Amino acid sequence: MEVSWLYLIPLLPLLGAAVNGLVGRFLPKAWLYAVALLVVLLSFCIGLFAWFEVARLPGESAQLRQLVYTWFSVGSLRVDLGLTFDRLSGTLVLVVTGVGFLIHLYSVGYMDEDPAYWRYFAYLNLFVSMMLLLVLADNLVAMFVGWEGVGLCSYLLVGFWYDDETKAYAGRKAFIVNRIGDFGFLIGIFVLYFYTGQVGFQALKVAPLSLGVASAAAALLFVGATGKSAQLPLYVWLPDAMAGPTPVSALIHAATMVTAGVYMVARLSFLYVQAPGVMAVVATIGILTALLGAVIGTAQMDIKRVLAYSTVSQLGYMFVGVGVGAFAAGTAHLITHSFFKACLFLGSGAVIHGLHGEQDLSRMGGLRRAGLKHTAATFFVATVAITGVLPISGFFSKDEILAQALNTRAFDFLTVLPDPGSPRLSFLGPTIYLVGTLTALITSFYMWRCYLLAFEGEYRGPAEVHPHEAPWVMTLPVWILAALSVVGALIVLPGHDLRFTWEHFTEGLFARTRGGAPAERLPELVAFGIALVVAWAGFATAWSLYAPGRALEGDERIARVSPGLRKALAASLYVDALYDRLVVKPLWATARTLWRVVDATLIDGLLVNGTAQAVASVGSVLRRFQNGDVQRYAAVTAVGVLILVYVFLVRG
Amino acid sequence: MNFNPSDLQGVLPALILAIGALVLLTSEVFLRASSALASGSGPQGHSERPAGADRRYQAWLAAVFAALGLWAAVAQMGDPAAPLFSGAAVTDGFARVIAAVVCGALVLSCFVSFGYLEALRATRGEYYALALFSASGMCLLGQATDLIVIFISLEVMSLAVYCLSAYLRRGQRPAEAAFKYFVLGSFAAAIFLYGAALAYGATGSTRLADVANAVRLAASGGSPAGTTTLLFAAAALLASGFAFKVAAVPFHMWVPDVYDGAPAPVTGFMAAAVKVAAFATLVRILVGGFGEPSVALGPHGWQKLVVWLSALTMLLGNLLAVPQRSVKRMLAYSSIAHAGYLLVAVAAMAGAQPRADALEGLLFYLAAYGATVIGAFGVVALIERKDALAGAGDDLSSWAGLSERHPGLAAAMTLFMVSLAGIPPTAGFMAKVTVFRAAIAADLVPLAVLGVLTSVAGLYYYLRVVVYVYMVPQTKAEPVAGGHLIAAGIALAGCAALVLWMGIQPDTFARLAQSATTSFAR
């Protein structure tokens, strides 16, 4: 259905960003808050209205479209700024604006004392606008604009306190690592355009693609996703991105932007199912990232870094979901994760706020009884959700992904080597299930460790810091998110006859994998039982090491048993050092050599100065003519005419 | 020749501009003389009122008339093409776009000139009247399809511009520049006339339509060899005459001296509008008169000629701009270089197939260059005020640290430089894309490659201005000469908006240019 008001959804936050960015400095604080919050709220309301429209429409036709305008048309390439609001993008619009609004509200409390609050809200509005464009775009080019736009906002907000050198550095790191991925994304777009002449999702859906083209495009686009969604090997920027204000970590680096890669794969499900090999890669990268993030998360002392590695790990789960062809399961986890992870991050923000900037778990403890009652309760709920010790949202969405990985037949017809006689890849799904279950155990362990260290036991911080609860503008959004983390379970409840589940709601939106319907390799109830046991095992391990009253004994015990491992984990497995050694340093060295040898000597010396000298000598010859003497000018003109006539008539 | 009064409607933009000029000249009669202020003896404010305050209305009036002309041109945009004055002129989409660009350039120039003239205490009535007269000649040039009419319109335009470039009668440089321009311009006009005479000799008519018929006849081998030779010689001479006006190498010698000597607002107007009119006529003559593809592409065809002119112009224009220290002189050489890019589009028009695309590209490029260069010279005018009062030429050092004194001005200049260099998302980029695309469609790939390579060289001297504006610390902490920055601000904002608009949303303008190509009367 064509509608004419869809553009308002991304436009309103953009206007808010313009107002706040241009005149925000001169507005009274209350006005600025009103503008920043209202535009997002209005977008949410419009989105809600549209969402009900879409939910009412039957299956395939359930989408609203608007061709805002033809952005440019060059030759055969026509790029429209077109928006599509279907059940997938529409629900994400609600998540982005809904969670976004809550985080805006929270920021009113969190950023109140920052002198650059106007800049902050302008960036935040701009981010929401760009994210909405990314989600609503109906073609790859418009999506790329949103993709780059959110990257820009992420850079601006990570380096928000740019006068701190390390924070500015973190911003740069995020930007550069993302650029590497974006390069792949861009080439992916070029590949698709080169072979099909199309960039629109609708047109690409029906365009015939050979296996090679589909695989190349899918793989290149996935490179972009590894950058934006912090997957191996490009995940390294996300932990450092925690240098930004905590609400930003919640909104951009947990709930919305980092899920863009998952969304992109789901949006292009029709492309990915044509490239089953790439899907295997996606799932493998996903599960490896999930495991790695969880393992590193066990030894982090900074509360935000624990959550950052947890995000990396959970994004890995989502990629497992879309990688094994369970697009609905992957995107469902995206939605539930955005609730509980935003809740966790905002909780950590309240802790940091209450402790005047303290982020180290070793100087926390006992915060539940020290006054942060609401924060502790909400953090507890969200931890339950993410670890899955009780069957609420995270339990079901994660378990669905693992069950689908176990049962998938998407890889059954693939062989390990091109040789048709080599073994089949059908072992991949069960392997992923096993690793994923192990990861779930570790997840439960590190999240409970984090909760126990922060909120239980005795307060370990300096005596002059008195922990205090955050104001209501900060606790209210956190409570709402905690409630959503519980209620979110509704959309991911198992059972195929429930009409309100996400799987049912998105039926027909995603392409089906070529392997056929999933096999049932494990009864559902058994899988749930295993998941529960694993989650409780993680909790039990955490409790045995970090039970209230033991303070940091747990960490010390681990360090005693295996000092090398503990050190390596705390240092994030030296991946940053490795990248530094393997990529950054060689690049610097190469750059310096190039600068000294090629640029300074060859280019500057020989080419530039040489050219300049050549030009200068040509110039000095020409300048003889350009001496201001009119007669000479006329003579040159006359000679010019003579040559012209000669060439014209005689030479031919 | 029968005179049909309704034909006047076809030349409405030119008519409006001429009437405006006459109104301004007449009104001058009723004002107190201001000769003491305008004489060469330098600035001296001995009257209590600011100099030229009673002449302020003239700028606004001129702008209004120019805007009326713009409106008239745009309002006629959809009308069908029709011959006027029994074939001496024509009204078609092409002419209307040309008139619209000229009038638009004039509106912007009026705003740029206003504060400049007041700051230099040189507000006199003839300035705007001359500008209107020249614009009127330019509009007619876009419409003329008879060699005699072309010549008359050319002189109407040129004489007014000669006077304008000598307008600031301070020091030697303006007079010298105008004199050179006049002498060399007359020389070029004589060459043009010679070509017209040859064409008349070969065809017995000065109408381009008759010339086109004769060319077609010659192409099919139905005319004596002498006639064919005469026609080719005529084409060479006519093209040379306008190669001078568009400042193609080797007819470019006057450009640096004249651009440097003339007041900056005039230079901007010259670079934008004179170029538009000259290219319009060049297209009328080459495509309308000698456009038969088999001739144009043939061994004696003009495509090869234009290709060489264009290659030389791009190369030398860019190379010579590199060592310039004066921004005005740099922009003069840049204007030569841009003439080279425009000639690429003209060369692409020789074949029948890519002709429409090339014409569209040419018009888009002219409009884009016009908006950019008026803006650039508008900023130069603001910087120059102080230096011109002191009688010195401008130098890059007077741009150092501009971003600290005037961040808005610095941003605008950066935008214009970026557009001239052809970097997205500006008008200059889209213009280059359309022109080079047409060249590739016309199988002129080497020319397009040369165009891209020389544009890269252009980055050096355009971005050097940006470097000075933002990165070189200022040496003298003086703001630009005060007073009436608002009008200039409006003009610069308008130019900047156009530059961005044409760069981001080129379709609006491309459609306009398309309408010109679909109703290009031959």
Image (tube, coloured by chain):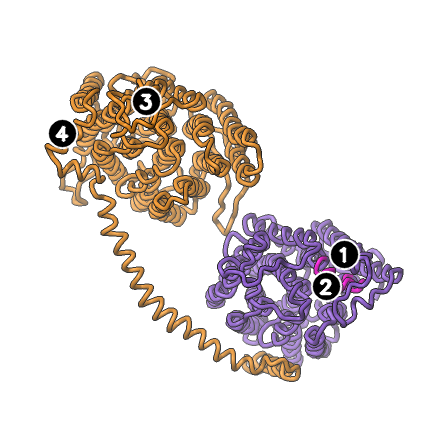
Chain colours: A orange, B purple
N-terminal of the pair, mark 3 or mark 4, is 3
The residue labelled by disc 4 is A557
Amino acid type, label 4: Arg
Question: Is residue B495 in view from this perspective?
Answer: yes
Provide the residue designation for mark 1: B59
Mark 4 against mark 1, which lies toward the viewer? 4
Q: CA distance from mark 3 to mark 4?
A: 26 Å
> Which region is colored magenta?
B115-128
Q: What secondary structure is the magenta-colored segment mainly?
A: helix
Q: Quadrant of residue A517?
A: top left
| Amino acid type assigned to the residue bearing label 2 in the image | Leu
**Under tag 2, what secondary structure?**
loop
- Check disc 3 and give the amino acid type: Phe
Q: Is residue B120 magenta-colored?
A: yes
SS for tag 3? helix
> To which chain does the residue with label 3 belong?
A
Same chain for marks 2 and 1? yes
User: Residue B147, percent across and down?
Assistant: 73, 71
Label 2 resides on the chain identified as B
Q: Mark 2 or mark 1, which has the lower sequence index?
A: 1
Mark 2 to mark 4 CA distance (whole Å) = 84 Å
Between circles 2 and 1, the one closer to the viewer is: 2
Name the mark on residue B120: 2
Tell whether B54 sits left or right of B297. right
